[in-house]
Image (cartoon, rainbow, N blue to C red):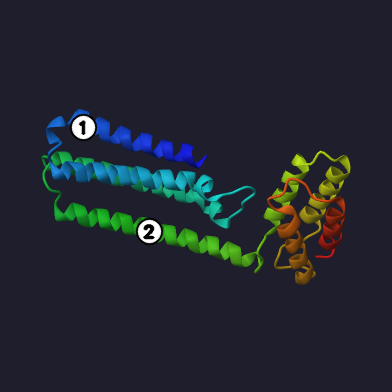
Amino acid sequence: MKKLSLALFLIIAATIIVVAVLLAPEQVHNTYFWVTIGWLVFLSFLNWFVSTYIFLKSGKNSINTKFGILPSLNVVVFIYSIISATFLLFTWFTNESNVLPNWHLITQILLFSTLSIFTIFFLFASKGAEISKGNFSIDKTKLLSTTEYLKSQDQNDENKKYLGELYEVINYSIPHLTKLKSEENYRDLTKIFKKHFINKEKVKTEIIKKAIVIAKNC
């Protein structure tokens, strides 16, 4: 997936460069022409990175609260890119392909600073979500996705039954992580998941039963 994602960006970047050269071949020796093209490629990189972050950073059953901010951040980056690129091309053509004036550079800096501020606010919100879930290494979403994955992989009917029960207990019996009946039991449950569940294809039946008992008392 990562290689396909990288190939997508390279295709987009190559398209921008080739089309620009074909549209203005007389500008290939103009340094400011390549500065303009470089900025357009950078804008495409920003959009590509935000759009494909989940594929670049996520592993099997990986859950990260930063993924929740991606849709909003994606929209902000896209709008910023459209404004910045349009402003750049307008200035480039009206300035007869010469060096960009200071007022343009100042405006671009202000636009980029605004995007950076929005991004920081989104990251603050992401961190706040992490804190609100309690200081635990694994949250409920991770437990549920791991259990569901194991159930889909295990061919043992008995294991499937107990994994289904464990999923129901985690989903409906364990409250919000800030309102647990026993944080110690929840930590014990996460230790079992780390040791026996995560990145595994199959778990012993007795381990699943033990996890169910602990989950009922979290």
Q: Name the residue located 42 percent from the left edge and 49 percent from the top edge.
A: 76
Quote the CA–CA distance across marks 1 and 2: 31 Å
Amino acid carrying mark 1 in the image: Val
Viewer-nearest residue: 69 or 49: 49
Residue 137 bears which disc, if any?
Answer: none
Relative height, residue 156 to residue 108 (above, below): above
Mark 1 surroundings within 10 Å by alpha-carbon count, few (fewer than 14), some (14 through 19), many (20 or more): some
Image spot of residue 175 (x, y percent): 76, 61
* Residue marked by disc 1: 21
Is residue 148 something that shows in the picture?
yes
Residue 116 bears which disc, if any?
Answer: 2
Pick whichever of labels 1 and 2 is earlier in the sequence: 1
Quadrant of residue 89 in the image? top left
Q: Nearer the viewer, mark 1 or mark 2?
A: 1
- Tell me if 132 is positioned left or right of 96 in this view: right
Viewer-nearest residue: 191 or 74: 191
Q: Name the residue located 81 percent from the left edge and 60 percent from the top edge.
A: 215
Mark 2 surroundings within 10 Å by alpha-carbon count, few (fewer than 14), some (14 through 19), many (20 or more): few
Image spot of residue 105 (x, y percent): 20, 54
Q: Name the residue located 83 percent from the left edge and 43 percent from the top edge.
A: 160
For the residues labelled 1 and 2, say whether their Cβ atoms are less than 8 Å apart.
no
